[in-house]
Amino acid sequence: DLLVGDLEGLEHRLLVDRADSAVTSRRNALLIVGLGCFSAIALIGFAGLLIRMDLSRRRAAESELKAAEERYRLLFDRSQSGIFRTNREGVLLECNPAFSRMLGYRNVEDAPDLHTDRDAMTRILQRLLTGEAITDVEVPLKRRNGEAVWALMSAVYMADTADPHFEGTIIDITDRKQ
């Protein structure tokens, strides 16, 4: 009988030990899983923080870019010198208000051929196409009403493959020429 009682006690202790180690294993597994979830949550939180920081930097850069674009647009619009952009053939693509006022045109579409001396303008365009920048060259232009106007022109060729064009400025010197 004593032997049977010892066996039952031993079985009981074995079962308790197994249960304790099973509970301990489960606790460790839950702890590991819990720590894993915490790590995952921490990583997700850190990634979210990085994304928020990146978005904040992007918004700041976009805001700075918008402010710079506005400053340059105002400089373009308020300049007293005529500022222009033409295609390779010399057809006007864009100009500022001072350019329009000088030549009497309301907008780019309203401006036909502005050149009174087409041969002289062709020579200037050829010089520009070779990479030479021209500075303060006197050129005759034509106002909307047909009247001649003398301008001091500076220009450069922008050899952009997607949009090759000329950019430049003009200053009305008609009064000086007379």
Image (cartoon, helix red, strand yellow):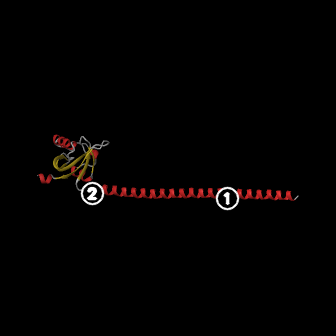
Of pointers 1 and 2, the one earlier in the residue sequence: 1
* Nearest the eye: 151 or 153: 153
* Disc 2 element: helix
- Label 1 amino acid? Arg
Any mark on residue 27, and which?
A: 1
Q: For the residue labelled by badge 1, is the local secondary structure a helix, a strand or a loop?
A: helix
User: What is the CA distance from the residue labelled 1 to the residue labelled 2?
Assistant: 75 Å
Residue closest to the far right:
1
In the image as oriented, which residue stretches furthest toward the left?
178
Examine the rendered structure and indicate whether residue 157 appears above or below residue 19.
above
Where the N terminus falls, by quadrant? bottom right
Left or right position of 2 against 83: right
Q: Which residue is mark 2?
A: 78
Label 2 crowd (10 A; few <14 / some 14-19 / many >=20):
few
Using the image, determine if residue 133 lies above or below residue 64: above
The amino acid on which the numbered mark 2 sits, given as a three-letter code, is Arg
Residue at x 14%, y 54% (from the top left corner): 175
From the viewer's perspective, tell me whether residue 7 is left or right of residue 119.
right
